[in-house]
Amino acid sequence: MKKYIIILLCGLIFLPSLGSIFVYTSFKLNQQEIARTICVQRKQIFNSCNGRCELQKSLKKYADNEKQMQDNLKEKLEIVYICISSEINFTFIPSVEFQQKNFAFFNSKPIGISSATFRPPARILYI
């Protein structure tokens, strides 16, 4: 199930970059109808346009829309950067010095040395 969700999200990420392909595909699917009804040269006998003028208009409209969206996004980013600026007052706090306390007293020689190493229990039993 995770693989399908990952594939779906990747597809959604790449979807905006495929916008012109969608415009071209929809044109190819409806090319005959566009050539008969919308095309500027539809009344000419030897029509070599076959609706490509409408394809060019659609692609230009899509490119302009994409550029406008990028400009709006850039303006919003600039506004965010401007609005975040705020003043922060830092105050100096003097550091506190600690004296190190030594608990080992070396007044006399050690009595014995422990050769056993501490080993934690292998299993912890929860009661």
Image: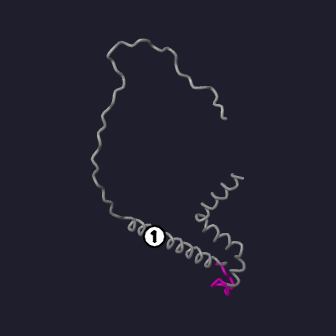
- What secondary structure prevails in the magenta region? loop
The quadrant in which residue 5 appears is bottom right
Q: Which of the 4 quarters of the picture holds residue 121?
A: top right
Between 124 and 17, the one lying in front of the other is: 124
Image position of 80 with respect to 31: above or below: above
The part of the chain drawn in magenta is 38-49
Would residue 52 be found to the left or right of residue 29 on screen? left
Q: Residue at x 46, y 71 (%)?
A: 71
* Residue at x 62% of width, y 26% of height: 122
Q: Residues within 10 Å of mark 1 (few under 14, many from 20)?
A: few
Amino acid at dot 1 = Lys
Residue nearest the viewer, comparing 89 with 84: 89
**In the structure shown, which secondary structural element does the residue marked by tag 1 occupy?**
helix
User: Looking at the image, which residue is at 62% across and 64% down?
Assistant: 15
Name the quadrant containing residue 16: bottom right
Count of numbered circles on the image: 1
Q: Residue furthest bottom?
A: 43
Q: Position of residue 14 (x, y in %)?
A: 60, 60
Q: Quadrant of the C terminus?
A: top right
Q: Is 111 drawn above or below residue 72 in the view shown?
A: above
Percent from the top left, x then y, of residue 40? 63, 85
Residue topped by disc 1:
76
Q: How is the image coloured?
A: one colour
x then y, percent, for residue 56:
59, 75
Residue 125 in the image, given as x and y percentages of width and height? 66, 31
Image check: 14 left or right of 99? right
Residue sitting nearer the eye, 56 or 125: 125
Q: Residue at x 66, y 84 (%)?
A: 38
